[in-house]
Image: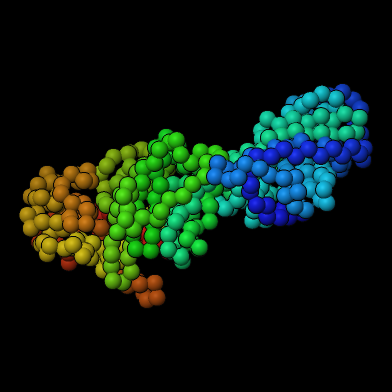
Amino acid sequence: MVNINKLTCSVLCSICMSIFVACSSQDDILNYIPKEEDASQLRTCELVLNVTKSGFNDEPQSRSASSWTNGDKIYLTFTVGDGTSYGDAVYNNGSWTVNYYGSLTEGATTKCTAVYFDNPEFESSSVVKITENTGIYEDINGSYVFNGGTLSVTADLKPKTGRIRFAGTNNDEITLYGISHYTSYDCSNGKFTNSNGALKAKVSSGYTTYVYGYFSDSEQPRLNVITATSGYTRLLSTSIYKAGESGYMTIPSEDSHNGWQNSVIFKVNGVEFTMIPVEYTNGNFLLAETETTEQLYNAITEDFETASLLPKYNISYSSWETFLSKLNALTELNFRIPTKDEWQFAFIGGNKSQGYTYSGSNIISNVAWYQGNSQGKRHNVKQLQPNELGFYDMSGNVYELVKIGNETSSSYYKWYGGYWNSSEGDCVKTSYQNYNYPEWSGLRIALSKN
């Protein structure tokens, strides 16, 4: 198939071309429904194409026929009786040629769908690969008439998504989460696939490229922006980022983040959890506000027997690795086990440390479930005071898995911070159990920014 050349979006225009040439194969039975074997027959003819193509709301309001470029392609799905036929219209030197499989309804005006892509990444013989930077224009209520060997198609192509770009300093790189985008279009069945995973963007000439998509959670839109030094979340109105809308946002920073919360709130499989940025000399990272709850663990692993806010515990290291692998697949991010140094730095309150004995206080009962107040059991997360950075239960409740060493050396694991039956002395920064004691232990997940 011919690749689509890049077509600069301008807008709202009507292109009427009248080319009447007999098709190479004719069907002269009214409302003919092709036999099974007809579906594999490729047919070609030139056509009358009556198309309007609307742009985004920040674009000029005119578009000339001459702006079509050789190789531009419109994908067509024709209704044929109770079935469908698929094809594409290709522009070349002022005219359009249609290629389609099977046969078309004869005589009557019949429904068809038309799809056009601006800047797709590539296409195979049957699949167009779409990126977050691909504009999609569609009319699901177009029509065609096939009469006497002449095919006419009428469609009003409009943007299928909204688009947004981010203003910042050149070479700034950000990760976005909360935007869904389309990833492919199957020409053989007219179906789109999409992704809810993270997206990368880089500032050039003051802005990132446009991100085409829609909010992953349309009822409560939330956008996460992870920068090189921090992470931010913003709740947004359901009235923005609609199909056809175009705009920009400024990348939040420590100095200017009005309207942005200085943490990242994820919603995965219906469950929310918060990651807090930590400034660290060995590389900034994000760490979970709480220990991983049964609710989150079960949502990610699709074990729906319990859904409490108690910390998940008493599972092996390999089970945690499986959980992280599934979470990373769903988000396209790099969640992981924190290192001992990262965990201990967060425990003391990072750069905001007040030098407390326990994580957030010198009075253990303010911040920890331990043998003196736990009644011999775990407790829901976030019931006591957080530490200076906003982390809950780093002392007590359950031990937390950390990694000793790094990727280039031999690594092993320990469990830090004490649990619900620990003494006061076992709820401090340096208190730990070895890896072979998982019974009272859980995990507070970390997130790398790369």
Whole-percent x, y for residue 301 in the image: 41, 46
Number of marks present in the image shown: 0
Q: Compare residues 435 and 401 and report the one nearer the observer.
A: 401
Q: Residue at x 77, y 27 (%)?
A: 110
Instruction: Say which of 101 and 263 sits in front.
Output: 263
Residue 220 in which image quadrant? top left
Residue 122 versus residue 103 in the image, above or below:
below
Colouring chosen for the image of the structure: rainbow
Image side of residue 170 versus residue 391, left or right? right
Residue 296 visible? The answer is no
Q: Is residue 179 left or right of residue 398?
A: right
Of residues 441 and 67, the one drawn nearer to the viewer in this rendering: 67
Residue 342 sits above or below residue 36 on the image: below
Q: Position of residue 405 (x, y in %)?
A: 32, 72
Image quarter hosting the C terminus: bottom left
Q: Is residue 67 visible?
A: yes
Residue visible at 36% across and 74% down?
A: 410
Q: Nearer the viewer, residue 361 or 26?
A: 26
Horizontal and vertical percent for residue 227?
38, 60
Q: For this view, does 289 lie left or right of residue 205?
A: left
Q: Quadrant of residue 45?
A: top right
Identity of the residue drawn at 75% across and 33% down? 154
Residue 216's spot in the image, x, y percent?
Answer: 46, 42
Residue depicted at 18% across the width and 51% down the height: 386
